[in-house]
Amino acid sequence: MSTQPVILKARGAVARRQLFSRFSRYMFLLATAIPVTILLVLTYDTVQTAWPRLDWGIISNYPSRHWDITGYRPGIVGSLWILGVTVFASFPVAIGTAIWIEEFAPKSRLLTIVKINLANLAGVPSIIYGILGLTIFVRFYEMERSILAAGFTLALMIIPMTVIASQEAIRQVPPSLRDGALALGATRWQAVRHNVLPNAIPGIMTGVILATSRAAGETAALIMIGGFTFIRFDPGPSPADIVNPSAFYDGLRESFTILPIQIYGDTINSQLDFRHAAAAGIIALMAGVMTLNLIAAVIRERFRRF
Amino acid sequence: MRQLDVKDRIMKELDETLAPASRAVAADIIAPEPTPTEEAIRPPAEPALFRLRDLGVWYGSKHAVSEINLDIPLNRVTALIGPSGCGKSTMLRCLNRMNDLIPAARVEGRVEYHGANIYDRSVDPVEVRRRIGMVFQKPNPFPKSIYDNVAFGARVNGIKGNMDEIVESALRRAALWEEVKGELRKSGLALSGGQQQRLCIARALAVQPDVILMDEPCSALDPIATLMIEDLIRELVQNYTIIIVTHNMQQAARVSDYTAFMLAAEHGVNGRLVEYGPTTEIFTNPREKRTEDYITGRFG
């Protein structure tokens, strides 16, 4: 009894499918390579342009008429204060909204409408939020063109995306954990507090930090609010004001500028050498945003212990 | 520890293998008119803990379970058996109001527990679930330490006392203490499937319930772990009332004192109680032809 050895070499349709599969791998590699290359080129170009001004003066000096000593201190301080206001104003509201939608809201048509609107709001151009902030906070609530008005405007802008990211994170928590807690006689709130939230926090933090990063780089909305000002002082409360609520509040009512707007101002300066300073400012902004992302990563890992 | 004999195991394997095929056949063979004959429902002559009266459950417009009348005795194991989609789990989840959590679910009729209707307006579902614990099909320990898993229920219910003792006693009663006593700080998810399920039982016991509902507690476990859980069930029934949903007829025969057989008109619709009585009678001398067909493996 002689049997022919089986031929296991791919032929015909199998060979074609395999070829396609191997080819697809390179397609995806290419898709990854394009943005990475662009990013590297941009970084190289920015660092090269910034080289003459890569010194601490770029973050510690006030703006100047001379490109070699000008700095972004008011913009950085302004950005930090505004981000602080934004974080405190938006995250409790956003995370609370997400918890309500996912855990407590009765499933109804109203809820569907709310959800759809949140998605739409996340896609509204930021200039629209600028106009909204100008109307509501600057004019109606008479906050003037202040840090407070700017912070609230950015809060409005990032609430929808924070809500959506938090909702997604909460939905990722297996329902069996919630059911397990409820079956033990936990209340809804206890199940959310002890079982849902701890497991959703990594996801929520990711969304929150991404939203903060977006707020940190936001320019258009704050030009509407009046961030395009030339300032030679530190906007916002001084460190000593922290113990004095009314002085603190007055500090938040000061006019402001922010880092992206200052950078933009320097890029359109008629003295071309200011682009060195602008590029250095961009690097400072990127370093700030990357620090935020690092913090997010650390928090994510800390909560992933089990 | 009781041993499964070889024949039992083979039967069990066979059951599980053939189940899908025979279920398909069953859909053709039986066009059930599941109105139970009077004699098929034999309420136990013991004190009842639960009395279900005309219990029905709707999922939206679907009548999942209807006209259930059942008395469940105190400190006994009652098994709910029947093919997939007959409403066993739905019925089980009515007993501690877990169906409240499904938005479209609606319950009609009465579930009396110690004589009180748990669907009464004045009843708080949290209070019900504290007294009536539940163990799920898939072990679902929290992503916390073993200790915190067990302590969780006691903590949320504000149970006072020495937490270490509460945890130890619950783990002992769940026959898990000896295996984990040195590593209580380890994650509950690091345990094996069978240990996880016993952890979930310990977690339920720590709340000091008097009933434990088990929804196919062994379906995700291997035979050895299954055996341990079954032994545990027999242990626990001295102090607790246990109601267990199972797909495994041998398991029902081994662990339960009473067995209820349910059947649905079609998958997930109109599940009804067909026969109820002492397990030995159900398995040796069923009154209903459909019960006999089911337990002898002619369908389901």
Image (spheres, coloured by chain):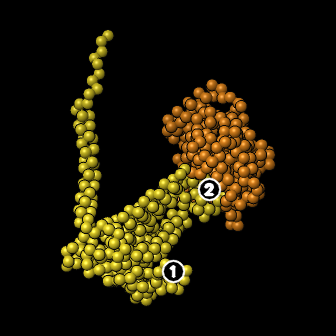
Chain colours: A yellow, B orange
Camera-nearest residue between A5 and B211: A5
Instruction: Relative to B273, say whether A252 is above or below.
Output: below
Residue A59 on image: x %, y %: 35, 72
Between residues A161 and B6, which one lies in front from this camera angle? A161
Instruction: Residue at 19% x, 79% y: name it.
Output: A270
Q: Position of residue A177 (x, y in %)?
A: 57, 54
- Left or right: residue A275 compared with residue B44: left
- The residue closer to the viewer here, B7 or A195, is A195
Q: Is residue B286 visible?
A: no
**Quadrant position of residue A123:** bottom left
Query: As displayed, is residue A141 above or below residue A2?
Result: below
Q: Residues within 10 Å of mark 2 (few under 14, many from 20)?
A: many
Tell me the SS state at disc 1: helix
Residue at the spot x=30%, y=12% of the render?
A2
Residue shown at 58% from the left, 40% from the top: B192
Numbered disc 2: what chain? Answer: A
> Which residue is situated farthest in the top direction here?
A1
Q: Nearer the viewer, mark 2 or mark 1?
A: 1
Q: Amino acid at mark 2?
A: Ala
User: x, y percentage for residue A243?
Assistant: 55, 80
Chain for mark 1?
Answer: A
> On the rendered image, what quadrant is the N terminus of chain A found in?
top left
Determine which residue is flagged by label 1: A240
Counting residues from the start of the chain, the first of labels 2 and 1 encountered is 2
Residue B148: x percent and y percent? Answer: 64, 52
In the rendered image, which quarter is residue A263 located in?
bottom left
Three-letter amino acid code at the position of disc 1? Ala
Residue placed at 47% from the left, 80% from the top?
A238
Mark 2, secondary structure of its residue? helix
Q: Is residue A305 visible?
A: yes
How far apart marks 2 and 1 lie (CA) works out to 46 Å
* Residue that badge 2 annotates: A181
